[in-house]
Structure formats: C-alpha cells, structure tokens
C-alpha cells in the first residue's frame, strides 16, 4: 500500500485549517487510498527539523506539498528535506504556486509532478497510477488531465486542463480527523483574530469559482461557479457542531452571494436549525449583491462579521482592475451592516500601476468617511498568472524577477505614480486617519463580540495600530513589519 504524506509548510499566514489538503485526503480515502497523513506545519508551528523527524518516522512513498506563490521557497525547502529523508519518494506540489507557474516549480529537479488547479481528481488518478506500479518512472502521465511534469529533455509538459468538478455535493467533506482540530481553535491566528467571536471555529466552502474578472486574482477554481446545495452545507455545519464542538463558521467562498436566493436559503436553514453558532465572512462578499433581506436573514442566522472586497473607488482604477463595483452600492451595503449591528471590514488596495496620489486619496477618503468597523489596507501585490502580473511586467520591466519576491507589507518599490517615501506616508496616514478617531474606536468596542478577550489583548492590538499609524524611518518600519512569507 502506497504511504502518502500531505504537507503544508509553515509560514506567518493565518493558521486556518488546510482545507485543500483535507479535501484531497478525503477524496483519496473515499476511493481506497487509506494510508495517508496530513502534516500541517503552519498550525503546529513546526520547524524544518521537526518536519524531518515526522517524515523519517512515517517513511512515505509519496510526499505532496501545497503552496501559495508566496510560499514557494518553503515548498522547495520541503522538497529537499523529503528527498533527503526518503530519496526514492515521489514528490508532488499542488496549489496556486504550481498552477500559476508550473515551469518555475518544475525547474527544481527534486519535483516529479505538479497538480494544477482543482486537485481532487487529478491527485487521485496520479496516486492511483503510482500505487499500481513499482516506480514513478513507470507511470505514463500523459493521460492524466491537469498535470505538469518534465520530459526526458527537462522541458515542462502540461497535460490538457481538467474540467471543473460539476457536482459539488458529490465531494466528501474535508478529512477533519486527519488534522489537529483543537490546535486550530485559537483566536490568535485566524483571518478574523482581532474580532473573532468564538475560538472553536471552522472554515467552510459552499461553492467554488468566481465569474468576475478582477485583474489581481489567480482564479484557482476557475470562472464557473459551482454550488453545493444549502441542505448539504447545513449537514456539514451540523457535523462540525456535533462532532468537534464548533461554535463559529467562517464562509470562505469567492462568490457566496452571487446567487442571492441560495445564499438566503442557507441562512434560513441555519436559523431554523437553531444551532446557536456565529457566522462570519472573512474572505469577503460582493457588496453590490447585498440587499436588506440578505443582511436581515444573515443576522438571524448568526452573522456577526462580514467583509467587503472594495479595493479602490477611483473610477479610472476601478475600470483598470475590472472590479465593476458601484461606489453607491458599496456604501449601501456598508450602511446595512451598520444598521444590523454587524461588524464590517473593508478590503482596500493601494498602489496599482500608475495610480496617482489623488486616486489613492479617493480610496482613503471613502474608507475614512464610511461606516466600516475596520479597514484592511494593503499595498498591491502582483501574483503570477494574473492580468495584473502581465500589466506590471510591461509597466515595470525587470521588477518581477521571480514569482516570490513580494510580501504582504512591501512590494520592494511602489507601482504607483509616487515615490516610495510618499507611498509609505500615504499608507501610514490612511491607518492613522481611519483608526485614530473616537467614533471609530467606540464602534470597535461596541461591536466587538468578545470584550474580555479584547481587553486581554489590548496592548498588542494598540501596538499594531500604532506601528502602522505613526510615521517612522523606513529602516525601522521594515524591521517592525516582518515579512509574512515563509
């Protein structure tokens, strides 16, 4: 029996459940590949040496690694580690990193295969083939869709793209039993850690795919939305509540509320089930698809936090990035959240290619004057295999040397039409103007769902705001903002 080890590298990204690996593990197990484990280095905060010991103890025949583009370096370190411990093992990488840049991933001679895009069916066909033969070199990967590998001359071969899985209800729920659920029940490492209501939470996807054309998105699951039925979603939530004592659900969909009837039906079923849980949307919803009935039904179901992907409000920038949001509709959505006492988060991006000071100021002014509870301001990070990446390649030739040079706080130099010093001053000023207002601070306190925890963590939260909102020398600022990549 082939022994399979699925690994997520350690990094400073939020310590949420590795749903991708858990979904693949459940799919493989459903089809008879039962000798498998998940090694989640991020949630367990493991070092490479600790991972080495775990690999040595398990002695896997196949090592599969998941990685975002910003985790590429860690993925290759794990490849070297795995091959050092198990020289004959087959190595696989999946996730956004190899999907966006398969040639870059396969430039590492230690990598055998890259699983592209949606991974369940491709991983199953590949691993099933590997389990049937004595060596990886005997597998013929040409017939496996959604795969990348090297030919005899070292060139990258891409098999035809795999069709998206149409029936989402046919997929098994993620393999929760293969991860340390108790280790994830912490308010200190999730997407919502500053304002999470309950520690015992679980993220859930109710759909895959996004039909919108935002130029900064990698579209890992494609443009075609595929939905799970509301009844299937409720059954999964009940399972999490009854089996693991989960008290909060985070919906992580890219397009939860595109089908408004379905979204409202999910809320209705959860409210009728009377599970006493909280609901949040840390990944954001479309602000132009929010109406009063959506907000009222969400509140009745337990929604206490909702994020809106706003990004920018300048008409020229909105057109350039293909966001397609109406500022008026965004304002209405934010106002509805305020009306129903729901903590609202606005996602904003500053520093698009050629963005002027005045255009960035428009976005900042909107955030400051809005009824948002919090604003998540980020500098623009071009990701491989996106139209934004292609645009930056033309406007800033030589800047994009690799797929992994950017981090979440600094892009090396601003892409906007301002100097780096001016860009950082705008950034700092935006945080200061948004948060250092009595009315905003009062709103933060009034809507926070766990005030005792907020008081316990107040020093760290205050320092986080101060280091973003006070002007500091560039070198010191960089030291304070440690890289969020591995």
Image (spheres, rainbow, N blue to C red):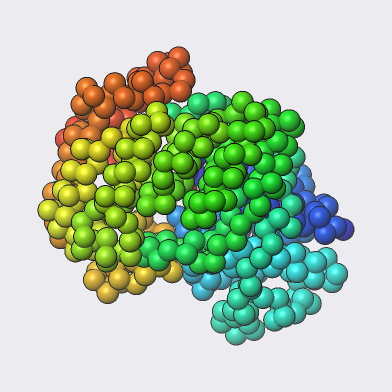
Q: Which residue lies furthest to the bottom in this view?
A: 153
In the depicted view, which residue is nearer to us: 156 or 319? 319
Q: Residue furthest front?
A: 293
The answer to whether residue 156 is above or below residue 40 is below
Residue 301 placement, left or right of 468 = right
In the depicted view, which residue is nearer to us: 135 or 347? 347
Q: Which residue is drawn at 62% across and 80% down?
A: 160
The answer to whether residue 393 is above or below residue 455 is below
Question: Measured from the top left, where is residue 466 in percent x and y?
Answer: 25, 29
Quadrant of res 78 = bottom right
On-image quarter of the N terminus: bottom right
Count of picture labels: 0
Quadrant of res 247 = top right
Q: Which residue is drawn at 21% across and 60% down?
A: 315
Residue 338 placement, left or right of 41 = left
Q: Can residue 155 be seen in this view?
A: yes
Residue 76 placement, left or right of 311 = right
In the depicted view, which residue is nearer to us: 391 or 400? 391
Q: Which residue is drawn at 75% across and 40% down?
A: 177
In the depicted view, which residue is nearer to us: 468 or 334? 334
């Amino acid at each position: 029996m082939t022994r399979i080890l699925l690994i997520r590298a350690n990094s400073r990204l939020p310590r949420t459940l590795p749903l991708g690996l858990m979904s693949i593990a459940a799919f493989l197990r459903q089809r008879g590949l039962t000798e498998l484990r998940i090694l989640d280095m991020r949630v367990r905060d493991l070092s490479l040496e600790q991972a080495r010991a775990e690999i040595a103890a398990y002695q896997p025949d196949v090592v599969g690694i998941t990685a975002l583009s910003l985790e590429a370096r860690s993925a290759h370190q794990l490849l070297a580690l795995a091959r050092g411990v198990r020289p004959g093992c087959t190595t696989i990488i999946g996730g956004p990193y190899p999907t966006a840049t398969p040639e870059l991933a396969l430039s590492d001679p230690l990598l055998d295969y890259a699983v592209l895009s949606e991974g369940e069916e491709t991983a199953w066909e590949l691993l099933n083939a590997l389990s049937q033969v004595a060596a990886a070199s005997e597998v013929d990967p040409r017939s496996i869709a959604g795969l990348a590998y090297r030919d005899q001359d070292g060139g990258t071969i891409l098999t035809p793209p795999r069709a998206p899985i149409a029936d989402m209800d046919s997929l098994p729920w993620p393999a929760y039993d293969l991860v340390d659920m108790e280790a994830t029940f912490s308010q200190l490492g999730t997407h919502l850690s500053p304002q999470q209501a309950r520690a015992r939470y679980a993220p859930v996807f109710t759909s895959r795919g996004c039909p919108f054309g935002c130029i900064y998105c990698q579209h890992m699951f494609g443009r075609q939305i595929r939905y799970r039925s509301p009844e299937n979603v409720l059954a999964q939530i009940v399972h999490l509540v009854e089996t693991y004592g989960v008290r909060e659900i985070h919906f992580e969909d890219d397009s939860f509320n595109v089908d408004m009837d379905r979204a409202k039906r999910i809320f209705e079923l959860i409210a009728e089930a009377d599970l006493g849980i909280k609901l949040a949307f840390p990944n954001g919803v479309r602000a132009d698809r929010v109406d009063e009935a959506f907000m009222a039904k969400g509140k009745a179901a337990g929604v206490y936090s909702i994020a809106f992907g706003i990004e920018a409000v300048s008409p020229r920038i909105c057109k350039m990035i293909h966001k397609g949001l109406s500022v008026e509709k965004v304002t209405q959505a934010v106002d509805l959240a305020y009306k129903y006492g729901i903590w609202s988060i606005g996602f904003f991006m500053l520093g698009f290619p050629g963005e002027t000071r005045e255009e960035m100021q428009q976005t900042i002014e909107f955030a400051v004057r809005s009824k948002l509870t919090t604003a998540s301001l980020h500098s623009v990070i071009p990701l491989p295999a996106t139209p934004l990446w292609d645009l930056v390649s033309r406007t800033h030739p030589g800047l994009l040397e690799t797929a992994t040079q950017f981090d979440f706080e600094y892009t090396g130099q601003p892409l906007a039409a301002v100097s780096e010093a001016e860009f950082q001053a705008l950034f700092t000023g935006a945080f200061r103007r948004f948060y250092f207002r009595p009315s905003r601070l009062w709103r933060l306190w009034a809507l926070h769902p766990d005030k005792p925890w907020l008081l316990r963590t107040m020093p760290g939260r205050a320092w986080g705001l101060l280091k973003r909102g006070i002007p500091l020398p560039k070198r010191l600022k960089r030291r304070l903002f440690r890289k969020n990549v591995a």
